Image (spheres, rainbow, N blue to C red):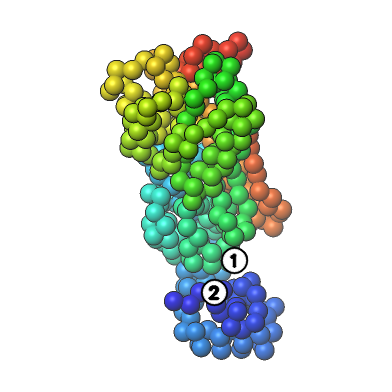
Amino acid sequence: MARIKDVAAQAGVSVATVSRVLNDNPSVTEETRNRVHDAMAALNYRPNAVARSLRTEATRTLGLIIGDILNPFFSELARAVEDEAREAGYTVIMGNADERPDQQDHYVRTLMEQRVDGLLICPTAEVTPLVEEVSLGERPLVFLDRTLSGVEVPSVRADGSTAIAELVAHLRGLGHRRIAFVSGPSTLSTGRERTEAFLRAAAEHGLEVPEEYVRVGDFRAGSGRRITAELLDLAEPPQAIFLGDNLMTLGALDEVRERGLDIPGDVALASFDDVPWFNHINPRITAISQPTAELGRRAVRLILDALHGRPTDSVVLPATLVVRESCGETGPGKEDGS
């Protein structure tokens, strides 16, 4: 099936020019408009009616598509988006992509048909033609938490690299030398970024990380439990396991408890993503906390800036390390006593 890029190449114009033709933008010359229509006919290209619906009048609604509604991170994010939007007089319509590109596109299409004024997406791993096309439309699109290579839209996300470096230093200071990391999918920007930050920090501290100590999960509890079991069954298991999100940490906890192992005596655990219940189990879980609510608020402000013609620079907020007892003795001044 022909895509908007194919039409642009056939007509000898930019993708943005094709988008302007599809949206009946008066700035396009008649000659260029004819060339684009001829290319569409030659390629049997059917314009996406959903993307073209972005030309409609304001509805005071925003669309939000999250990765996994069962993940506490996304639940808190959605709540912050809804609260901030309501303060500004907007209603939020939400869809759960369930980490599936086809489900994501279903909600993109549905929300565009609902004529939302702008769209916030926590994108899945794939750049779909529909998301690519919407990114070139006249209504604003903001990526939240994650980014997509090759799709140039404003984004709001957290940078955990400094906090990960602090965690590795903390683990090393407690005497841990064999540290494993369970990342999210490398196809997701968050999975790649956290893996790269961990490996960089380990190298800076002179820690050797065997290949079998770096595993890829799917940001869900089942993969956290399965991979933790595999790590613990190694001939030389890690002394500490750092998991790339809260749900995988939950799975790891289930596996460690099932085996009757002590935390941190037999194995230390740490998590990227802090959640309230980490502070209410024994031992309390050391975690990297993202400014989740602020991410949601800033994303709404960014999309409203776009709607009002104001500058829309991407936003990057720092994550922070919260040291508790799950890796060993708590360092002075670091304990979270809330």
Q: Position of residue 40 (x, y in %)?
A: 53, 84
Which residue occupies the foreground of this view, 301 or 188? 188
Look at discs 1 and 2 and give the one toward the viewer: 2
Number of the label disc, if any, that sits on residue 2: none
Label 1: which residue? Answer: 136
Which residue occupies the foreground of this view, 264 or 96? 264
Please identify the residue farthest to the front as the structure is shown.
Answer: 235
Seen at 28% across and 23% down, the residue is 258
- Taking the image as shown, residue 158 lies to the left or right of residue 266, namely right
Which residue occupies the foreground of this view, 246 or 212? 212
- Taking the image as shown, residue 116 lies to the left or right of residue 265, namely right
* Residues under numbered marks 1 and 2 in contact, where contact means CB atoms less than 8 Å apart: yes
Number of on-image labels? 2
Can you see residue 321?
A: no
Q: Secondary structure at mark 2?
A: helix
Seen at 60% across and 10% down, the residue is 332
Mark found first going from the N terminus, 1 or 2: 2
Seen at 55% across and 54% down, the residue is 148
Number of the label disc, if any, that sits on residue 4: 2
Can you see residue 220?
A: yes
Q: Position of residue 74 (x, y in %)?
A: 45, 40
Seen at 50% across and 87% down, the residue is 41
Q: In the rendered structure, which amino acid carries the disc numbered 2? A: Ile
Q: Position of residue 266 (x, y in %)?
A: 39, 16
Q: Quadrant of residue 39?
A: bottom right
Q: Secondary structure at mark 1?
A: loop
Which residue occupies the foreground of this view, 337 or 57? 337
Quadrant that contains the N terminus = bottom left
